[in-house]
């Protein structure tokens, strides 16, 4: 039996321009837009931390420096909070901070697609399996999506792709997998297609932005072959890797919010606000009034 190596590192592609959120994203990266009181990217880093990830590789682009600042100590701010006895606020900063030396930042120099962004992390990842988390997708559940995937991975090894069910009318917007034999905690993937033409999707299971991949994916990505939208696609590279390695799907039981869309972003704000006892009562009361008038 082949050894199942631990997943220690995660890649977070954060180079996207965020044009769908202009003018909000003119000077602020889309990953820094807030859901209640945390930036979108922080939810994703916390999900990875909860899954045991030890090193975070951010693939950035121009104007993304503030993401690096967010995951660093802010000496003056923390000193002021300490002086003023603001312990809750101080804790909120300390809890989300990756350990010293546990972050890397590399740049995707040209927007050639998600597969190209992932390939930019190859030297930092090296020869070991890694998690890939797309920060647009924010997961809402008691158990983090990646933690559940790691559990499945430790049983079956290979490559794991998280999926959720979508409205068939929306399948052309995503990567879609074909469903094979059931596994304990998932199913075997028989097919993968990026943005299938309307009416051709092999199922309603869309790739919801979380992956555990073996390092051989980099060899395939280095061929720089273009796919849907004339971009270098991770899904196409995975399909090639599936010729020699197993791919299993992890059906995520929670809710996936696509914070790269306005609707998803607003719904994520509502969902996370309703989890918060301090703000829930007023939010529920006012939402009910707004909905009654809509
Ligand atoms: C990417 C992936 C796609 C996946 C989606 C989830 O697409 O290529 O397979 O379903 O993320 O958000 P993108 O959103 O970059 O078009």
Image (tube, grey):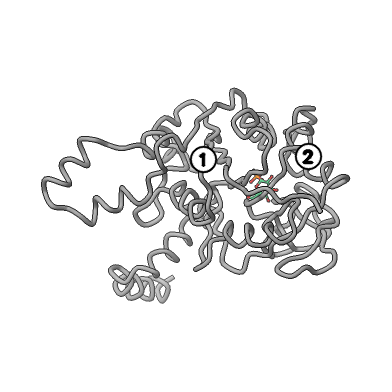
Q: Nearer the viewer, residue 246 or 59?
A: 246
| SS assignment at label 2 | helix
Q: Label 2, label 1: how many angstroms apart (C-alpha)?
A: 22 Å
Residue annotated with mark 1: 56
Name the residue rendered at 70%, 54% in the picture: 161
Rendering quarter of residue 128: top right
Rendering quarter of residue 273: bottom left
Upstream in sequence: badge 2 or badge 1 = 1
How many other residues sit within 10 Å of disc 1, few (<14), some (14-19) or many (≥20)?
A: many
Which numbered marker is on residue 237? 2
| SS assignment at label 1 | strand
Does the beta carbon at disc 1 come under 8 Å from ligand 1?
no
Which numbered marker is on residue 119? none
Name the residue rendered at 51%, 40% in the picture: 56
Task: Give the x, y percent position of residue 148.
Answer: 61, 62
Q: Nearer the viewer, mark 2 or mark 1?
A: 1
Q: Report the residue that reaches farthest toward the left.
A: 84
Task: Give the x, y percent position of residue 232.
Answer: 73, 33
The relative height of residue 15 versus residue 42 in the rendered view (above or below) is above
């Amino acid at each position: 039996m082949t050894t199942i190596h631990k997943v220690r590192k995660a890649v977070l592609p954060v180079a996207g321009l965020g044009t769908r959120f202009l003018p909000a994203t003119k000077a602020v990266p889309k990953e820094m837009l807030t859901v209640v009181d945390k930036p979108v990217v922080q939810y994703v880093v916390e999900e990875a931390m909860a899954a045991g990830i030890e090193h975070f590789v951010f693939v950035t682009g121009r104007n993304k420096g503030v993401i690096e600042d967010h995951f660093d100590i802010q000496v003056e701010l923390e000193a002021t909070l300490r002086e003023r006895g603001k312990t809750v606020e101080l804790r909120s900063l300390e809890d989300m901070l990756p350990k010293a030396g546990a972050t890397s930042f590399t740049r995707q120099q040209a927007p050639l697609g998600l597969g190209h962004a992932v390939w930019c992390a190859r030297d930092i990842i090296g020869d070991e399996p890694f998690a890939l988390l797309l920060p647009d997708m924010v997961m809402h559940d008691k158990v983090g999506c990646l933690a559940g995937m790691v559990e499945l991975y430790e049983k079956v090894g290979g490559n794991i792709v998280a999926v959720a069910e979508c409205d068939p009318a929306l399948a052309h917007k995503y990567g879609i997998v074909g469903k094979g034999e059931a596994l304990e905690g998932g199913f075997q993937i028989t097919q993968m297609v990026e943005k299938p033409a309307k009416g051709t999707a092999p199922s309603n299971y869309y790739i919801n932005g979380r992956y555990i991949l073996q390092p051989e994916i980099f060899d395939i990505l280095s061929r720089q072959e273009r796919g849907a939208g004339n971009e270098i696609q991770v899904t196409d590279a995975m399909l090639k890797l599936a010729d020699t390695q197993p791919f299993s799907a992890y059906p995520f039981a929670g809710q996936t919010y696509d914070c790269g869309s306005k609707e998803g972003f607003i719904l994520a704000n509502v969902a996370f606000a309703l989890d918060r006892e301090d703000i829930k009562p007023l939010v529920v009361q006012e939402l009910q009034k707004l909905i009654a008038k809509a």
